[in-house]
Amino acid sequence: MKAAIVVFPGTNRERDMAIALRGVTGQAPAMVWHREAALPAGTDLVVLPGGFSYGDYLRCGAMAAHAPIMVAIREFAAKGGHILGVCNGFQILTEAQLLPGALLRNAALRFLSQDCFLRVERNDTPFTRHWAKGDVFRTPMAHGDGNYIASADTIRMLEDTNRVAFRYVAGDGRVDEGDPQLNPNGSMNAIAGVFSENLRICGMMPHPEDLVDPLMGGEDGKPLFTGLVEALVG
């Protein structure tokens, strides 16, 4: 599997993502600078990692959504390419309208850097195939603008078409949208990640790449990357 990680000014999680991908593919992913006009030939997966692209000016991800490389990424998406956006990458995907909704300031209006629990809402996608539906896993979060919001019609559509990827929950899988301990940023319906209509684009706020090795404190996030490799290579 050939993966390409897109790097914008202010990106700071590209090396974490590279470690996670190299651990399951055995090869280093390509690093693609935001001014490039094309993705590397044969790219199977594009990853938009976390950070503060363009210093988060205007809105988080707003400027990155109009970077030169995004033309190639939109074309890649239109052809059915697989894309993973984590944290700032999720914000960029919503700003680029490759995923629905928006990420606003956390409900408590403060930056959150802590562990959280996510529940897997479906396991028939390349991103979730190594979990069972309903599995709960621990993962770090680090963001100030992770409050997922969308119109009532969009939320209804996401729920009715089973396009919620991950949800913030308690360790036992319980959901309580109004409990700041369980839904730290206040996201609507406790949504932590969503899929595109064709299930080939996934955006999520927490960082599974930061738990892929025992030396990191656990391997809770590794199934996402293992599943991607199997899906895209097989």
Image: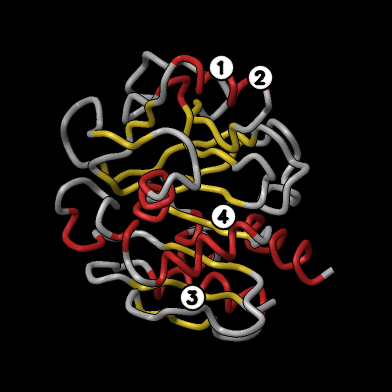
C-alpha distance separating marks 2 and 3? 34 Å
Residue at (50% x, 26% y) in the render: 170
Nearer the observer, disc 1 or disc 4?
A: 1
- Among numbered discs 4 and 3, the one appearing first in the sequence: 3
Mark 3 touching mark 1, by CB under 8 A?
A: no
Residue of label 3: 18
User: Horizontally, is 185 left or right of 39 in the view?
Assistant: left
Task: State the residue at coordinates (51%, 39%).
Answer: 193
Look at label 4 and name its amino acid: Gly
**Residues marked 1 and 2 touching at CB (< 8 Å):** yes
Kindly indicate the quadrant of the structure image that contains residue 102: top left
Q: Amino acid at mark 3?
A: Ala
Disc ID at residue 160: 2
The residue lying at 66 percent from left, 56 percent from top is 223
Disc 4 secondary structure class: loop
| Mark seen at residue 110 | none
Q: Pointers 4 and 3 in contact (CB under 8 A)?
A: no
Q: CA distance from mark 4 to mark 2?
A: 26 Å
Nearer the viewer's eye, disc 3 or disc 1? 1
Q: Residues within 10 Å of mark 2 (few under 14, many from 20)?
A: few
Callout 1–callout 4 Cβ contact below 8 Å? no
Mark 1 or mark 4: name the one nearer the start of the chain.
1
